[in-house]
Image (cartoon, rainbow, N blue to C red):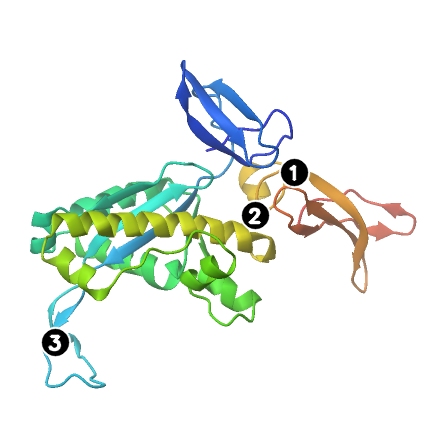
Amino acid sequence: MTAVCPSCSTHHTRRKGIRNDKQRWKCNICNKQFTTPLMEYESQFPKILLFDIETSFYHFVGWGTYKQYINHYQITQHQYVISWAAKWLYDDQVMADVVTPKEAKNRDDKRVLKSIWKLLNEADIVVGHNGDRFDLRKLRWRFISQDMEPPSPFRIIDTLKIARKEFFAPSYKQDFLTKYFKLQNKLETDFQLWVDCEAGDKDRLDQMLDYNKHDVIGLEQVYIKLRPYMRNHPNLAVLMDEDVCTHCGSQDLVETDKEYATSAYKYPIYRCTACKTPHIRHKTYSSQNPTSFRST
């Protein structure tokens, strides 16, 4: 949920808190600060949720420690979700939940699953790093294991998949990307943290939650950094039913002096001044009379 900046008409705004029954905002583009009535800010901007989970170990029995293949019948205790952290795009608040010491010892994650389920059920788009392959699949398995129904459908943006598809980088891990682009780095941790969390150590569970929250802030920065290069980003213009940037929802689209030509048509190229994404827009040439254009 965002508000439209009154100066530059962008949805790139973030909440700064409530004062005197007004919602305070700051624009990420022009830095203007402004206020709106408490409910007026709920525009058509899609709900984009960035999230990350931390899970426990599997426990299993075996006959060795080197290159062992573990069969399912060797598992003595299954993984559970220790914590999750999430935030709405551009919102300063980081939401999170972690198992209690008692829940950790009992390997009971149903309460924290219910809290992340509610957010996923609200979201139009969900962003995660390796979220499609790991986080969401793991959550679905834990949901069905706890006899929970699936959340409402949403679009998925996996920043790990996008980084691998669009770039030839030395590494695609979030830790590398945040360090390389001088974004918020992951907190240092070690194997023992997970051991202590499973044992129900309250201080270490709090540390895990901080680690998880830190990751989500870095994830948002990675997503925004990679976004102009995402060729299959969910089309926000369709979700908002407005003529806006397909990637960020901004109305600040400027036509460039370049056109994209196919064997039959020419298309003008626009660029979003907010997120810098280039857009090819439909503009069909028939003899001397171009038709109207729309976002692709």
Q: Around disc 2, counting alpha carbons within 10 Å, would you say few (fewer than 14), some (14 to 19), or many (20 or more)?
A: some
Mark closest to the chain's N terminus, 3 or 2: 3
Q: Which residue corresponds to mark 2?
A: 235
270 on left or right of 186: right
Q: Provide the secondary structure element on which disc 3 rests.
A: helix
Which amino acid type corresponds to the residue marked 2 in the rendered image?
Answer: Asn
Q: Which residue occupies 41% across, 58% down?
A: 129
Nearer to me, 4 or 152: 4
For disc 1, the neighbor class at 10 Å (few under 14, some 14 to 19, many from 20) is some
Q: Is residue 67 visible?
A: yes
- The number of discs equals 3
Residue 135, given in percent of the width and then of the height, sits at 32, 58
Residue drawn at x 29%, y 54% is 53
Q: Which residue is mark 3?
A: 73
Q: Which residue is mark 1?
A: 243
Task: Tell me the amino acid under the disc marked 1.
Answer: Asp
The residue lying toward the viewer, choosing from 228 and 232, is 228
